[in-house]
Image: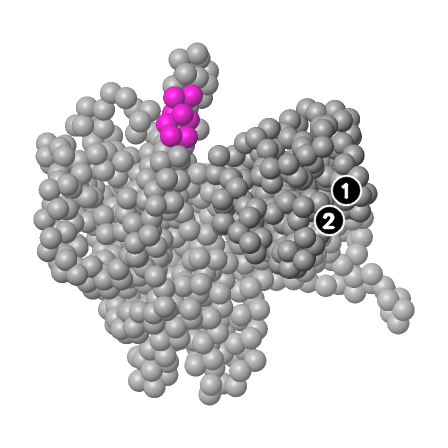
Amino acid sequence: MRLENREGRPTSGVLEMELPQASAPSRAGLGSLGLVGLDSSNHRPQQGGSKAGSRGPYLSGAAGQSCWVPMDQDFGPFLTERRSHCPFPKHFSSRSKDPCFTENTPLLGSFSQEEGSRCMPVYHPEFITADEPWENSSAEWEGGALLSTELAVSSGSASTEKGELLDSAHIRCHLSKLRCCVQWLKVSGLFVFVVLCSILFSLYPDQGKFWQLLAVSPLESYSVNLSSHADSMLLQVDLAGALVASGPSHLGKEEHVAVEVTQANAPGSRRRRPQQVTHNWTIFLNPSGGEHTVMSRTFEVLSREPVSINIRASLQQTQIVPLLMAHQYLRASIEAQVTIAAVILAGVYVLIIFEIVHRTLAAMLGSLAALAALAVIGDRPTLTQVVEWIDFETLALLFGMMILVAIFSETGFFDYCAVKAYQLSRGRVWAMIIMLCLIAAVLSAFLDNVTTALLFTPVTIRLCEVLNLDPRQVLIAEVIFTNIGGAATAIGDPPNVIIVSNQELRKMGLDFAGFTAHMFAGICFVLLFSFPLLRLLYWNRKLYNKEPSEIVELKHEIHVWRLTAQRISPASHEETAVRGLLLEKVLSLERLLARRLHSFHRQISQEDKNWETNIQELQKKHRISDRTLLTKCVTVLGLVIFMFFLNSFVPGVHLDLGWIAILGAIWLLILADIHDFEIILHRVEWATLLFFAALFILMEALAHLHLIEYVGEQTALLIKMVPEDQRLAAAIIVVVWVSAIASSLIDNIPFTATMIPVLLNLSRDPEISLPAPPLMYALALGACLGGNGTLIGASANVVCAGIAEQHGYGFSFMEFFRLGFPMMIVSCMVGMCYLLVAHVVMGWN
């Protein structure tokens, strides 16, 4: 840079300042030195270069050489030294060799980039030679002083930027440390919890029940005296035989078994003698013999006195009834067990809601805690009993259908269906979403909703990928309507199947046709209100991806490659090499993704206007890839669905849904001639199957802790408190909302099985006199629609989430809750109003 005086001649002194740049923070620290250079011989910068390795603060040099001083030191000594022509150190005599910095560089126009510094010549009155007048340089010094002020401000702003960068780096460092601490606390806390539960579970032995064979009749009863334990609070009595959970209200006309449990109460302060307390338990016999049924009842232990059990039979004929009886003492009261069960359930939901661990691991931790609690109270189950708690029919259904869908996806049929759905909707996204939800609701009314979710989820994901939509929002809406449609018929949802299968309810006229006709009308009203609510909830949500389809597909490809690399076990050298190649592929794709994201500037339209052109392109790109395999898949799947219908309507078919799905999977594996079976097994959602197994164990353990029974009893007590003229309406409202909330928190299958005898006993109570069908319809509506409240409220929700996670589009608990819970509230409200009008106003009982 070159500054001239008023006469057009170069100035006699040039002060060059080197300022650290903010763009080179690694080289210019907070203590960086600015350098000042002086040239009095020819008034231009020297061509020498500054060497970082120079030693010594001062080296000798001739007068007139360029001189450099640190900026953080006082200029006075240097100025005095310069005016007396004292030599400056050679250490400061070097110059930048930046070619862009010359003596003709405009002021503030260019700067040197060498060593991350900026050079600027300024004037000072001291930097003048003897042949220059002071007046010529004083004005120039004033301008230079202003320039120095600007440089100081620029240097301060650079320092501020560096300070902000350092602060952000410190914040990131602190956040990283905090994240590590939280991770360590989480792992340590969960590990301590697991170890504690394992220790508690191992300290108490299995309470194997010792069954005793009894023979009772009207002429002969059975009596036994049991010694009480010091730490016992409850006595559990189990009876097994041809028994039923409920019976008619007139006890004198039906065969039943009466159990009397008598114990002497401890003497109080006002009575000297102990008082005898008797508990009665009536169990009805199955007139047709039936299958072996186990009934349990708990009685409070009042003192340490012996307990007497007397069993007698009330029969129409003098015959003998064989029974099995077992008993055991428990170390906790009903209230304590219910509290423990509620705490365990709340802990599982905390783990799932805040995504502390995977939902499968959360269910496993809850199961372990519930088993440990059962062991502590004296009711530890054996391993055989725990395995029997698992509903293998549901697991077999899921496994078989997953195999069928995995083979079906190889034909390209899902891509073809996605393009056809887009073509039928004529490019209108909301028309397509409503059409998908309506089809899912109709199919789930005749198929199991789990099967519907297994079939529709891959099609929906592929459709959203083709249209650059976010699959998460569409899948959540679809599975919600799957649960709504499943409530329309007697075979659409497991709670409906349990209600219709009850023999006592069939005697009351609650058969397949009557149940389906009543529920179908109510679900139609629910659907009419659900579609507008869905549009309202999605009013401000962006269904399209914020990024173009190329970037979305690239991200999904990276996820698939990484997932494939993680699934390869490095057991051999070849597998290790393949895994390395896959990870290299992931790195190259990530670099490509970074470049595309950097160059992405276009906006995504909210509605596809050129749908006809897109249809032609999509039809060329997404076609049926294997028509022969497609024919085999359609044949087997059609036969499986036909067998599902036969199982529901034809009693001669002795195959459950799980067996039908397993047999269909075996048929298709043979027809498709699958050689590499491991590829098919990789498509199975093992995490989902493990989650259901752990969930079944957890729910059964909570039932053993009397949580579900307690909810049913409190519901009955709440209904009894209502006046008689308003009791039916209150009963419908209470049963609907209690069932909905309970089914959104726990599995609706054990809840429905527990609530049926409670409601039957409530309807047989002569003091209440409520009809049973309205209560059962309220139970079915609440249990089916309540599954939309949370992610684990229904089996279809978990299946859909597992498949979406496998495809790289998993959604969290809160994402489902934000849409599902409002839909549950409105749908239950509409269903409740329908039941009130049908049974209270119109008297359709």
* Circle number at residue 83: 1
Give the residue displayed 10% in from the left and 32% down from the top. Answer: 628
Tell me the amino acid under the disc marked 1. Arg
Left or right: residue 595 versus residue 84 is left
> Which residue is denoted by mark 2 in the rendering?
126
Q: Where are the magenta residues, as a range?
A: 580-588
Disc tally is 2
Q: Nearer the viewer, residue 28 or 431?
A: 28
Give the residue displayed 43% in from the left and 80% down from the top. Answer: 728
Q: Which element is circle 1 on?
A: helix
- Residue 453: horizontal and vertical position, in percent? 30, 50
Q: Is residue 678 magenta?
A: no
Tell me the amino acid under the disc marked 2. Glu
In the rendered image, which quarter is residue 137 located in? bottom right
Q: Is residue 303 above or below residue 240?
A: below
Which mark is first along the chain, 1 or 2? 1
Whole-number angstrom distance, CA of label 2 to CA of label 1: 7 Å
Q: Are marks 2 and 1 in contact (CB under 8 Å)?
A: yes
Left or right: residue 581 versus residue 272 is left
In the rendered image, which quarter is residue 13 located in? top right
Left or right: residue 90 versus residue 22 is right
Give the residue displayed 58% in from the left and 53% down from the top. Answer: 5
Q: Which element is circle 2 on?
A: loop
Q: Nearer the viewer, residue 162 or 17?
A: 17
> Does residue 249 appear in the picture of this structure?
no
Give the residue displayed 85% in from the left and 64% down from the top. Answer: 267
Question: Label 1 crowding class (10 Å Cα cut-off): few <14, some 14-19, many 20+?
Answer: some
- Residue 195: horizontal and vertical position, in percent? 69, 36
Q: Nearer the viewer, residue 617 or 725?
A: 617
